Image (cartoon, grey):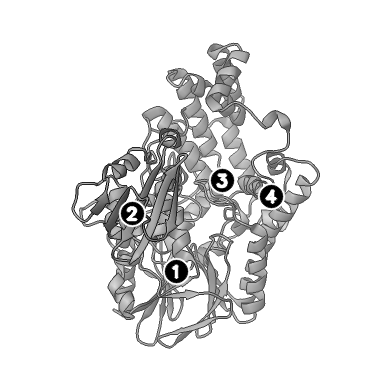
Amino acid sequence: MLKNDPIPTVRLAHAAQSAMLPFDDTADFEAADRGFLGTTSASVIEDDDGNVVWDLGSYDFLSGDAPETVHPSLWRQSILNAKHGLFEVVEGIYQVRGFDLSVMSIIETDTGVIVVDPLISRETAKAAFDLYTEHRGRRPIRALLYTHSHLDHFGGALGLVSAEEAASGAVQVLAPEGLVGHAIAENVYAGTAMSRRAGYMYGASLPRGPHGAVGAGLGQTTSTGHPGIVLPTHEVRATGEKVTVDGVEIEFQMAPGTEAPAEMHFFLPRYAALCMAENVTHTLHNILTLRGAVVRDPNVWSRYLTEALALFGDRAEVMFASHHWPTWGRETVVEYIAAQRDLYKYLHDQTLRMANKGLQGAEIAEAITLPPALEHTWGARGYYGSVSHNVKAIYQRYLGWFDGNPARLWPHPPQALADRYVAAMGGMVEVLALARTAYDEGDLRWAATLLDHAVFHDPDNAVARELYADTLEQLGYGSENGTWRNFFLSGAVELREGSFGTPVATAAPELMAQLTPEQIFDAIAITVDGPHAWDLHLTIGVVLTDLERAFMLTLRNGVLVPEEKAPTEDAQVVVRLTKQRLLGLVGGDLASPGIETTGDPQVLSSLLGVLDPGDPDFEIVLP
């Protein structure tokens, strides 16, 4: 429950931002409305069981001037992102926007279409393509194209084509090299933790409205339907590679290690159109996303944008991406890409310049200032990434979590530290008094720090929890960054109402089915409860009958080690099964048919008995 009005500190900060930023610049609104052909009459998209997976009408409140509970710049961005429907980029290229976090682009070929980035869920992807068909007529899908390895750019594929259609060659599926491995690993290895944190990041459980969720800056939020994947039939491996699909030539530029570990841009000579995937959008993006990920490389990111200008700058008349609205006009396209390039390069270089003068990441984040030309550019504002957390990520990339101060090398963990802070300040009564004073004076960051210690010391203290929730609520109201707002407000909701868990789980069965055997064994190894397995020494042979591959698994010292080789004589048990049945076994199903064992079957039970899967409901704002 979110309930309070903004305190004077927040209202004054909003007024200052309103005076500083160029709100009279309406170019983005003109671009976001350009080419609008229509939208759906249905307000919701449902799955086969009648569950709402996307509600287009839930953001209808986004209009007019910003309310006091929302940063005026974020309100502006959210209005732009909430526009939904089918839009013509140029004749022959169309986008469905506002049907999910990402954008689906549709390129018309000689006799059909290429669908680019089919959203997160099969339900939203189908609804988006149905809208295209309603306005442009039914055209067969000749190819899917995934620009990169994040779920919102391939997850809805099964809503458009089947795996059989791709395997038969009827539909090509184009993707950058390594996409499947990166996509599956990201959603499985640390998937439980990422998904739980993503519930905060995207505000999926927040009420929609001026006091709650207004968007995530990159888009509104994530759909809650069924994700899957149709495996690529062609991996693009080199910049300059060209592929022709049903008469339309596509020229590719590889951009690995940028916004995603596997990512690519492409140019369409027929349409003089350049797609920059998710590397050039209408926001400062993340160097390290708040849900968690591998830290990205802003220096490499900027280099690929420079290369894109050299490859396509003199040919592109329009630029579109996997989020937001397009940019038209050759000079405007070139300038926009160059400004985005400068943005990431500036953050990279200035962070390292100050680090080399001895400043720590948190200090650099407070000290750094963008050049005026970028500070006053809407597309460089921190709606999704932020200058603050991106700078800390760059520092982390080069120097790690430790800032070099020996007092911070071995601090107590949060709960033990909280106990000591509360005692040092004179007990809970004094801590709460200090926090109340900080809140009343508008020093919300200090109030949050004090109250973080208070609730970790005494999580059942109702006064501490309510004041902490009030504080997070105000920090959310003041945030220009959509994901910061969602984090703050989600914390407030959980303090008042308890954990909402993980609204969207990314480890869907259709994705799990694409794990390689090596990835399955990695996923098992990650869940081994080391201390409980210290005294076990197990040797297990695994023969995957459908893949004609065999492995030896050894558990010793709490470590599960797989080797691809035929079962050896010292195997305590040999298991013959399919890869799909192996997934069921990992889930704890020993009883169902499909498993043939030789040796001691109790060894399998011993292994399963020390597996400790992740907790999708773990606490975040409480110990």
Q: What is the C-alpha distance between the residues marked 1 and 4?
A: 30 Å
Numbered circles on residues, count: 4
Indicate which disc, 2 or 4, sits on the residue closer to the N terminus: 4
Residue count near mark 2 (Cα–Cα under 10 Å), binned few <14, some 14–19, many ≥20: some
Label 1: which secondary element: loop
Q: Is residue 399 visible?
A: yes
Which residue is labeled 4 in the image? 398
Residue labelled with disc 3: 480
Q: Are marks 1 and 2 in contact (CB under 8 Å)?
A: no
Front residue of 244 and 134: 244
Calculate the distance from the C-alpha at mark 2 to the C-alpha at mark 3: 32 Å
Of the residues tagged 3 and 4, which is closer to the observer?
A: 4
Q: Looking at the image, is mark 2 or mark 3 earlier in the sequence?
A: 3
Q: Nearer the viewer, residue 187 or 451?
A: 187
Amino acid at pointer 1: Tyr
Q: CA distance from mark 1 to mark 3?
A: 30 Å
In the rendered structure, the answer to whether residue 51 lies left or right of residue 266 reads left
Label 2 or label 3, whichever lies nearer to me, is 2
* Residue 544 screen position, x and y as percent: 31, 61
Badge 4 element: helix
Which tag, 3 or 4, sits closer to the chain's start? 4
Instruction: State the CA–CA distance, disc 3 to disc 4.
Output: 27 Å
